[in-house]
Image (cartoon, grey):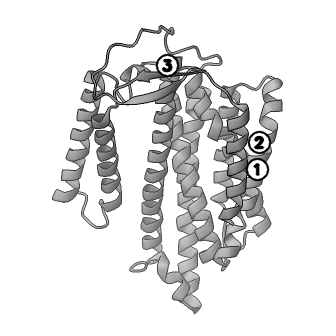
Amino acid sequence: MFSINLPLGVAVLVAAGCTLHLPQQTVARRIDFEGAALAAAFAGALLLVTEWGGTDYARSSAMILGLIGAAALLLALFLRRQVTAPEPILPLSLLKHPVLRSAFALQVLPGAALTGSIVYVLMYLQLARDTAATQASLYLIPMAIGMAVIGLTSGRLGRRGWTTRTFVVSGTATVTLALALLATSGTSTGLWLVRGEMLLLGLGFGQLLGQLILLAQETTPAHQLGVATTATRFFQTLGSALGTVLFGRVLARVYGAHVPGSTTGAITHLEGTARTEAVHGFVAATHWVFMCAAGVMALALLLSVLLPKRPGPARPERRQPPEPQPEHAGTVSAVNG
């Protein structure tokens, strides 16, 4: 299945190489390796706190408190580095613009909701509806269709007056509705209804995935477009990781309250009354997972509604001649679009 992407990817690369000719200027730049390392270490410590806290270690244990302290220290060091670095990996000046702050937050929230929704829809189908793993994966097709429909119609909608803000507001509202509907899924919910909810989810996420990056790029100075784009991707990835961990914690906590001393992995080995009780407990747990995901997207909807209708640039573009760089500075190619 994955091999089908190879000839398509080769065709895209060939077409881009033959038709896309952008002016290119080589400029010496310093690479903020220290800032990148601090950002990665902070994200790792934060994920370990959410993963281990309350499960492998008590929340008040020395390990968790130490990780929290380490995460706080690493964040402080990262912020300090971004203030003092000649060319920081995440210039804090970008955070002065309210639209960019909202764009970064809007990357975290849908990233968490998207990962959680896909994982737990598949779990619901397999554990609560006895759907084989291969058959459960087919339920992602309606979601893919919804995203493809948006991709094909977004240009036409843009010509009819839809702005980036319009897409973001509409997309967050649609995803919130889809997740709220998924929260009502039970042991007798029609599977075609689940497919319809996945289609609705795809229509919502299709409006968000590219538009959130465009939202950040519209308000970023041209010479910082690469930094802003990379930052949005980082926040999206961080949101996905946090969403997987936190929603997993919600699922385990609610399921454990309904079926004490058991885990969701044991459901497939149960029979009779024990299995029925476990399935009902799992459905109750997925209800809360999807409700939490809908709440996350409701917060994203609030942020998107508060966006200005016509966001301006973060600051006037002022190009400075490149300063002389030391011999050890890295050299990268900056594309001037």
Mark 3 burial class by Cα count in 10 Å: few <14, some 14-19, many 20+: some
Secondary element under disc 1, as helix, strand or loop, is helix
Residue 90 at x, y percent in the picture: 39, 29
User: Looking at the image, is mark 2 or mark 3 earlier in the sequence?
Assistant: 2
**What amino acid type should be assigned to the residue bearing mark 3?**
His
Vertical comparison of 165 with 181: above or below: above
Q: Is residue 180 left or right of residue 63?
A: right
Residue drawn at (81%, 38%), measured in percent from left and top?
A: 153
Q: In this view, does 251 lie to the left or right of 329?
A: right
Q: Which of the pair 182/51 is nearer the observer?
A: 51
Residue drawn at (55%, 27%), measured in percent from left and top?
A: 216
Asked whether the residues under the numbered discs 1 and 2 touch, taking CB atoms below 8 Å apart as contact, a structural biologist would say yes
- Distance between mark 1 and mark 2 Cα atoms: 6 Å
Residue 334 at x, y percent in the picture: 50, 25
Residue 309 at x, y percent in the picture: 65, 19
Residue drawn at (30%, 21%), measured in percent from left and top?
A: 86
Residue drawn at (55%, 20%), measured in percent from left and top?
A: 219
Q: Mark 3 points at which residue?
A: 223
**Comparing labels 3 and 1, the label whose residue is closer to the camera:** 3
Image quadrant in which the N terminus is located: bottom right
Q: Determine which of the numbered discs, if any, sits on residue 184 in the image.
A: none
Q: Mark 1 points at which residue?
A: 146
Vertical comparison of 291 with 321: above or below: below
Residue 140 at x, y percent in the picture: 70, 61
**Comparing labels 2 and 3, the label whose residue is closer to the camera:** 3
Q: Determine which of the numbered discs, if any, sits on residue 150 in the image.
A: 2
